[in-house]
Amino acid sequence: MNRSPLLDDPSAAWSAYDPSTDGSWDLPRVAHLHRRAGFAAPWPILQRDLKDGPGPSIDRLLNGESEGPDGQSAASLDATMHAMATQFAATNNLGRVQGVWLYRMIFTAHPLRERMTLFWHNHFATSNAKVGNTALMQAQNDLLRSHALGDFRIMLSEIARDPAMLAWLDCTANRKAHPNENYAREVMELFTLGRGRYTEADIQQAARAFTGSFVQNDRFKEVASQHDDGEKTIFGRTGRFKGDDVAAILLEQPSCAEFLSAKLYRHFLNEVDPPSPELIAPLAKSLRDADYDIKSTVEMILRSRLFHATASRRRRIKSPVELCVGTIRSLEIVKPTASIDALVQATERMGQSLYAPPSVAGWEGGPAWINTTTTLARSNFVLGLAGKDGGLGNRFAPRTLAERHHASDPSEFFVNLLVQDAFDTNVRGRMRGDGAATLVMTSPEYQLA
Amino acid sequence: MLRTLRRGGERLLALGLLLGVPIVATAQEVPGSRWVSNEAFFYAEVPHPVSAIDRATSDRVASLLKAVPGYQKALEGPDVRKVFDVVNLVASQLGTTWDKAARDLTGGGIVVAAEGTNAPDRVFLVMTPSDVAFAEKAHAKLLELARADATSKGNPDPIKENEHRGVKAYSVGANEAHAIVNGSLVIANSGETLKVVIDRALDGKTSSIVEDPSFSERHKQATPDTLAWAFARTDRLRTLDPKRYAAKPDAGATFLFGPWTEAALKGDWAALGLTWTESKMAAELSLATPKDGYSDAMKRYLPAKGSGAPRPVSVPNAIGGASLWRDLSSIWEVRAEIFPPETVQGLAQLDTTAGTFFGGRDFGTGVLGALASRWNIVIADQDFAKMDPVPDVKYPAFAVILELKPDDEEFATRLKSAFQSFIGLVNLGAAQTKAQPLMLGSDSVDGLSISTSRYLPEKGKAKGEPVNARYNFSPSAVQVGNYFVVSSNLQLAKDLVPALKAEPGSTESTLLAEVSGSALASILDRNRERLVMQNMLEKGNAKEQSEGEIQLLLNLLRYLGRASLSAADRDDSAIFNLDFQLDAK
């Protein structure tokens, strides 16, 4: 695949995509937008957005729609999901809590928000394997969702008080006599600056600022008597800093916006071609200028020429959650959808167990998603949707879906729905018969976003 | 018109579902039963099909079935609709409706039999109409339509006609032959079988199954209310399928059902009767005891006459319960004989460790040996209004009642101590997961001290925050005379004190169990929101779909009313009764 020349021309790369000069607004572009900014879209949504053009389509993704894929209003789904999360969070049954999130991703009217919640879950990676408390994990998930497209400053400040995060990093009793450096280290290395952009002294001083943080009865508590109120020097600044002050200092560092922008680039654009500092600089500037408002930076990405460039397509590997939720949404398996319990198991077999990332660094992603075991699991998921014996419930009837959309050639329909321009004429010609949809979904191209 | 057809279709499918269950009898002789040889290995009769049709097509049952998602889907399927259309077309051509036709065609009763020594060679059904003229007319109409259909498609005549001793026989394939014999429609698995049945009907000389003493003795089980009755010669089935009957039951089945599995595998016959009236649905299964009696090991499962399972204990807000007679100490002695080696190995570990909870007593003689043979489990609703905090998911309370042998007073103290050790272990686990601990305490009723425990409330919990299901439990233990109660909840332990002081007494049964469908439905109803959400995740349903499925479950439980199960061991058989006192509302 060709590398986009825009990668070497930052100014052109981040300028707004114009269909009249940068390539027409066609089905592959619409599908690419939904694969990256949502979880893939069903045929009617692709057709609607093809007709409406990029502006309204991106607006809808940024702001959410009024109805989910099953016609349920966004407000009604949010209420149901809140009740469901409340019901199951206290059970300490991880599978149920994972299921609640997958259910929400399938039915959401705001797929970009869920996608960003997943992004932050990987960014602030916290695992129930150590926290051992699904109520805290659910509360963290709610926190990430509420700021998913909001203010990173607030999110960073709140994550420092999040009981699940503190339990995960062994910081449930941070006393001034023994400052715990875990959170101070992770907040610099993984949450804001990146490795090598701080000193050990910065960590030690920041750790003092975070003393007095406790988790008691599953709640965050500041214990003033355990806070080290002395002067600290962090990144050259001296004062009687507290945790929030550390967050503010970190956000002031130029590398913070660069680090976050590079992660957003990898998430939305490209995990194959590493970006140059020059390419990231305009994005980072936008993030800083917007005072760390995430939505505006995401918007800049989604409206850019680089995003809509043909060479940007299929430069990412779908994560297991993206694959499962995207497949279900695009195949309109929503009334009813697949067994969520079976879906939880399927994503786990593919290597992604929600609320259980493998380390503080989250899931590695990219080519790490693909190995012999996970490839088999991906195929089994697809076969399970159409199969009779799979726990996924035999929910997919290719012929019925094709007929619903008056497709004269079902094989052609599934290629257009699922992979568009990924197949050349030769490969398209081989996707024939009743099993065409399954062939498409088990192809290497379908594993790419 | 379409609506009428649909309504008719629904009722027809309901009937079909009913006839799909194992069939079967009455105190009266059903026409055709004398045509079954005493060499049959399976016999079934439906003496009053009209009652069955009435029950299955009643508005209550129809509305319940209608709410079953699969049923509704099946009704809408093209194949089922095609069948409905054909049936309704035939009925309309005969100037009747399908349900009247079904009643007229089957009103005299139905008999099904299978015969054969090495294989099920002869299988036939005898259906006796209440209106023979109508049956002949219907039969002629069906032949006419089948022939017309074949002609229109350019196919040869699908019906072959024969005659045997003046009786006209018809066949639509190698595995089907039928005739109207003495006013009954006989459908057989081959022309040969049909000839044999015609001969028996005309000659009346066969050694009929109805004259077989083992059959007629069992047939007394049928009453005028019996909807269906079946009889199987398991000794002959063993010859037909020796592999299946040579299989050894697994350890769990042996422990739970010991002698009954032996009866099923080694007995000579089994009989099943089904009853379904407005107010009751019941099944009675009898299994013959093996000809030479049970093995010595299995005899240890059987109570002496008159001293079987204890009577159910009555407490306020009872939902149900079970009682059992089982001499565990005696069974423990023969464990190597009745269980597979891997289970025996597991039991050896239990032997080594379990005794430590009871002051180092030997598990077999010191622990099981101190227990008498009467066991009781009680399930009751809880008064959640009196609870603080109130758990989000609301479970019923349950208690296990052990009867102790009177000559070992120290054992009850050991049990109390084991209960407290158990609470300590739970707290150790809770400390590891930072869950709330159980606080030990005591209470008293009628001068008896109850060891109790309660979960420490969570501090600083805001109103509306989820409350863990653990607050359903306040584990308690109390000794009442020779009974030792371990209860999930203090109130139930208290309620059991006067009930046990009244001494429950014994029954003739080995096992008794009962449950109130309406009480169960109330509990489920209280947890409806959780059940709906669970259903959404398990099945991927939308909220409305899940709500519909849960509502159906509640309706079904309420309809089934009070259910009871009993198992009694007699000299010649083991008898199982399952009863539902239906809610007619």
Image (cartoon, grey):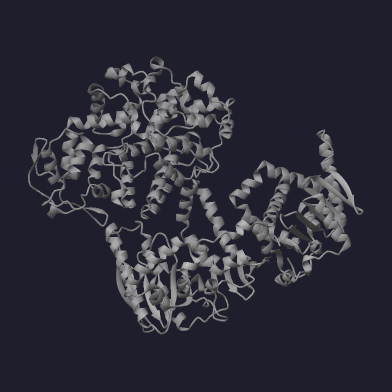
- Marks counted in the figure total 0
In the depicted structure, whether residue A18 falls above or below residue A68: above
Residue ID at (37%, 70%): B475
Name, please, the residue furthest toward the top: A21
Image quadrant in which the C terminus of chain A is located = top left
In the foreground, B45 or B71: B45
Residue A333 appears in the figure: no
Residue A365's x, y, as percent? 33, 34
Horizontally, is B3 left or right of A21 in the view? right
Residue B550's x, y, as percent? 52, 55
Horizontally, is B421 left or right of A253 in the view? right
Image quadrant in which the N terminus of chain A is located = top left
Horizontally, is B398 left or right of A355 in the view? right
Residue A82's x, y, as percent? 39, 48
In the foreground, A280 or A297: A280
Residue B321 appears in the figure: yes
Residue B573's x, y, as percent? 63, 72
Horizontally, is B28 left or right of B478 in the view? right
In the depicted structure, whether residue B299 falls above or below residue B122: below
Residue ID at (87%, 46%): B161
Residue ID at (40%, 39%): A350
Q: Quadrant of residue B430?
A: bottom left
